[in-house]
Amino acid sequence: MTGSPADRAQADALVAACPMGAPVRSIAGEVSLLELAAVLRGAAAVVSVNTGVMHLAALLDAPLVALHGPTSRRRWGPVGRRSVSLAPATGGEFLSLGFEYPEGPVTCMEQITVDAVLAALRDVMQPHPERVGS
């Protein structure tokens, strides 16, 4: 888990919610940008929402599953040989320019299932030399 020092408690809570023995740890507020790049480069895989961390992981060619709820994966998704983007089947990907919010609460991220993420992780961790983004 990454983030700023202000994100540390929330990142620690997410790590604690992972199954015992899962290879997940928090580095929120503990590393510089260069150190983060080294962590991403050495990671077995990265799962990220649409952030700078996602784009850095793609740039470094880390196996990456990018989660897009409100953001359009075609416009904002990662570009990398080992990058896969997931989005909800319905109700998501409405942010193309960044300001197209619908009225009411948006709960599209919940449509991306753990099983879908795990399947994408298994796929992205396999050799696919011809893959360039998705």
Image (cartoon, rainbow, N blue to C red):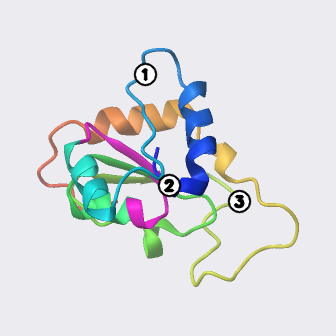
Residue contact between numbered discs 1 and 3, judged by CB atoms under 8 Å: no
Which residue appears at 80% of the width and 73% of the height?
102
Q: Earlier in the sequence, mark 1 or mark 3?
A: 1
Q: Earlier in the sequence, mark 2 or mark 3?
A: 2
Residue 104: which disc? none
Q: Of the residues tagged 2 and 1, which is closer to the observer? A: 2
Quadrant where the C terminus sits is bottom left
Q: Residues within 10 Å of mark 1 (few under 14, many from 20)?
A: few
Q: Amino acid at mark 3?
A: Gly
Q: Which residue is mark 3?
A: 91
Residue 45 in the magenta stretch? The answer is: yes
Asked if residue 31 lies left or right of residue 60, the reply is right
Secondary structure beneath label 3: loop
Instruction: Tell me if residue 82 comes above or below residue 121 in the rendering.
Output: below
So how many labels did they put on this image?
Answer: 3
Which residue appears at 67% of the width and 55% of the height?
90
Q: Which residue is mark 1?
A: 22
Q: Which residue is mark 2?
A: 3
Instruction: Tell me if residue 77 comes above or below residue 69 in the rendering.
Output: below
Q: CA distance from mark 1 to mark 3?
A: 31 Å
Q: Amino acid at mark 1?
A: Ala
